[in-house]
Amino acid sequence: MKVMKFGGTLMGSAAAIQRSAELVLRWAGQEAVVTVVSAMAGVTEALLKLGAQAEAGELEEVTAGWKALRFRHLEAGASLGTQAATLEQIDELLETLRQTLYGIYLLRELSGRSRDLLLSFGERLSAPLMAAALTKAGSRAVALTGGEAGLLTSDHFGHARPLPQTAERLSLQLLPLLAEGSIPVVTGFIGETSSGVITTLGRGGSDYTATLIGAALKADEVWTWKDVDGVMSADPRMVEGAVNLEYLSYGEVMELAHFGAKVLHPLAVTPLQESGIPLRVKSAADPDAAGTLVRAESGPSGPVKAVTSLRQACILTVSGAGMVDAPESLAQIFSLLAQRGISALMISQSSSMANLSLVLRAAEGQPALSLLSERFLRSEWVRDVQLREQVAVVAVVGEGMRGTQGVAAKLFGALAAEGINLLMIAQGSSELNISLAIEAKDEALAVRAAHQAFLSRPDHSSKKAAGSGRLSVSH
Ligand code: ASP
Ligand code: MG
């Protein structure tokens, strides 16, 4: 049995949904398949925008945006030959969406709870379209919301977490459908509290839905379909010799996910780790290729598997001799940032403890600077808070680095040879990842130099990724 997840791009239009349905059907003839779908490409973003406009009282914009969404879904439905009754259900959902937006407009209030409800329409509208495409091809398909499929969650709106009963409930709902030969099409990303209120698992959460279902149903493999080759050793736009990776360990894929490489939602790895079920990143452009297999073992490779990078970062440095031996200073800095939802991508503290440097997302630099300056500048701990903008982070990832000497030396040497200055360095004690903050202008050069040092095979011709999007790095 397989769980197959289709992201927004593969659900982007009637034609894309049709192709995705064909991928399901290639395998559904021989084995049971559960399908998990994202919203049509761009719809989650559009809903977020509509929510903000409704809250701001911009009714005309909201109406126009809603009409565009309605048109897009109904048109896709019609081109897929969706049965009249299903089209009617889709239109009813769209009407409920309109009312939801109007409610937000009237109240001028968008709570976490109403935002989750609002965002849920993306997946609730796309699942019936995939089911329609499968039905038209002659198979039995049933569209289900995450809640209907058994995904019971906490009420942490925006980042709800599955409750312990979820696994059992998922099997209870889905196994009978599989037994009667149907293909369940489950909305990714959304669940439901025990009182039936819709929740979301966080952006990109459809991956998590897929692996939760995979683990609950003891699938052989979870497949996430992408419109690109499997995961590559670097962004092929930066590195000509980037190659497809055959294997990644759970730990490696998490490192890549944390680095903004949209391989997989980092939380989606947990159910895989707990159940030992492998995941395959499959290319829709080349469905018979094995893709990248994500499993417990890292597989044969050198110390470094992939080089990834993240643009649009900044470094915030807090310093002051008063921080020495005052652990509460760190606690306060982090809790203040946490209260504003600012997360640190990389952290380093000098051993004198007199300064702390944090890599943050570029957009959060100025807010964090004012926040910390206001609060701490005249405190007994902090003498100075500084922000350095135009920073990129480059990371090398691989299980093989663990216990191998000379990896950092080689990396630093390769970058030094290109005249690249390192602003900050971090290696987790898991030794899976070495991250370097550098000036943004050096990003591509650094990625190429690191790839060259560890991964380039000069006698092999470079393998180009199919399709236009790239998996290795995103920003
Ligand atoms: N549609 C949601 C998002 O864009 C969930 C997903 O695509 O996984 O974040
Ligand atoms: Mg999406």
Image: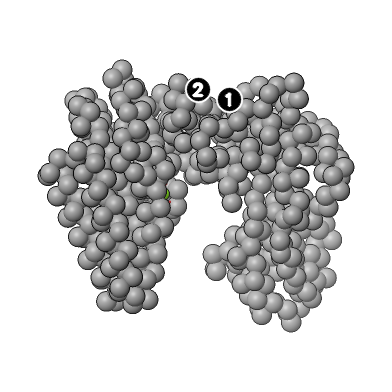
* Residue nearest the observer in this picture, 154 or 179: 179
Query: Where does the N terminus fall, quadrant-wise?
Result: top left
On the image, the x and y values in percent for residue 114 come to 32, 64
- Residue linked to disc 2: 290
Is residue 378 at all visible to an observer of this figure? yes
On the image, the x and y values in percent for residue 71 come to 26, 55
| Above or below, 414 relative to 26 | below
Residue 342 falls left or right of residue 136? right
Spatial CA distance of label 1 from label 2 is 8 Å
- Which residue occupies 81% across, 65% down? 354
On the image, the x and y values in percent for residue 50 come to 35, 65
**For mark 1, does the 10 Å Cα neighbourhood hold few (<14), some (14 to 19), or many (20 or more) residues?**
many
| Above or below, 222 relative to 376 | above
In the image, what residue type sits under mark 1?
Glu
Dot 1 falls on a residue whose secondary structure is loop
In the image, what residue type sits under mark 2?
Ala
- Which residue occupies 35% across, 32% down? 19
The image quarter in which residue 299 lies? top right
The image quarter in which residue 388 lies? bottom right
**For mark 2, does the 10 Å Cα neighbourhood hold few (<14), some (14 to 19), or many (20 or more) residues?**
some
- Residue linked to disc 1: 246
- Which residue occupies 64% across, 58% down? 312
N-terminal of the pair, mark 1 or mark 2, is 1
* Residue nearest the observer in this picture, 432 or 16: 16
Residue 108 falls left or right of residue 383? left
Report the residue that reaches farthest toward the bottom: 378
Is residue 332 at all visible to an observer of this figure? no
